[in-house]
Amino acid sequence: MNLKRFQTSIFTAILVVISLNANAQDQRFRIGLKFSTNLSWISPVSKNIDRVGSSLGYSYGVMADYNFQKYYALSSELLFTDLAGSIVHTDRLTYTDSMGTTSHSDVQYDYKFKYIQIPISIKFKTKQFGYWTYWAQFGFSPSFLTQATADITGKTVPFDDPTGIRVNKKVNDEYHYDNFDDKVFFMRFPLIIGAGVEYNVAGNTSLYAGLRMDNNFLNVFVADDLTQAKNNFASLNVGVFF
């Protein structure tokens, strides 16, 4: 476990302890643990790129509901999310090395993103039918980039060292193989909509499962008017409320 992952785990554990203490004082407040798998993709906005398939990712973290009315709750989460996606450039990109400058077609970028997400939504619930409660939710999920990387390949000539491939409109603006943090916008601001069920095990303990769509409003690339796209995903979520 690296230092960043260790710090993240400690931070999550602290939030769980604090929230569990609050739960003991107010039964309208519930805390839980959550894990999800997602299918993510990059949706092109500009015409110079095409989408290439979808990729698997995951999220984990804590979730909390505050039931301000009998069938309505304010829901919030703290998630650590991995997304991915691929695009191919339909225009030609230049590549500069010690031998000079060459031009390449069909250059593909396979991205991996890491975000901290803070979803906030209104949850609408049914009354409990036996052990089952059904719910739907609608809200937003501010997300903050912690890391972005990419693998770059080209159909014309494979790139052994892609440093120097210019993809932004600025002449000296270059992408790098191992660190794209400064080329990917630091924030996502998606609309989220979801639905699911809870199964009451005993007392305040319930199992949780649901589906969610996460649609980003913002361009995933930094200050790039030529190449614009949005990264979106659908997720299957499971967890437990205490």
Image: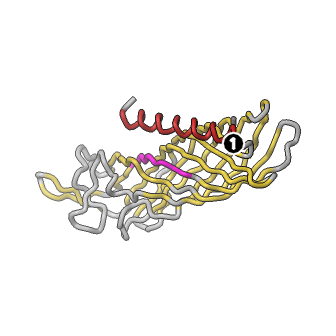
| Picture residue at 47% right of the left edge, 52% below the top | 52
How many residues crowd around disc 1 within 10 Å: few (fewer than 14), some, or many (20 or more)? many
Q: Quadrant of the N terminus?
A: top left
Q: Is residue 196 left or right of residue 16?
A: right
Is residue 115 on the magenta stretch? yes
Q: Position of residue 11 (x, y in %)?
A: 47, 39
- Which residue is most to the bottom? 225
Q: Tell me which corner region of the image, top left, top right, bottom left or bottom right, holds residue 160.
A: top left
Q: Decide if residue 238 is on the left or right side of residue 171.
A: right
Q: What is the image's colouring?
A: secondary structure
Q: Quadrant of the C terminus?
A: top right
Along the line of sight, the residue nearer the viewer: 15 or 98: 15
Q: Secondary structure at mark 1?
A: strand
Identify the residue at the far front of this view: 25
Q: Nearer the viewer, residue 31 or 91?
A: 31
- 227 w.r.t. 79: above or below: below
Q: How many marks?
A: 1
Residue lying at 78% horizontally and 36% vertically, measured from the top left: 199
- Which amino acid type is shown beneath numbered disc 1? Arg
Left or right relative to 95: residue 239? right
Kindly identify which residue carries mark 1: 30
Specify start and end residues of the magenta stretch as a single range: 110-118
**Residue at image x 45%, y 62%?**
229
Confirm whether the magenta stretch covers residue 114: yes
Q: Could you tell me which residue is drawn at 48 percent across and 64 percent down?
A: 218
- By secondary structure, the bulk of the magenta-drawn segment is best described as strand
Q: Residue 100 at x, y = what percent?
A: 13, 57
Q: Nearer the viewer, residue 68 or 187?
A: 68
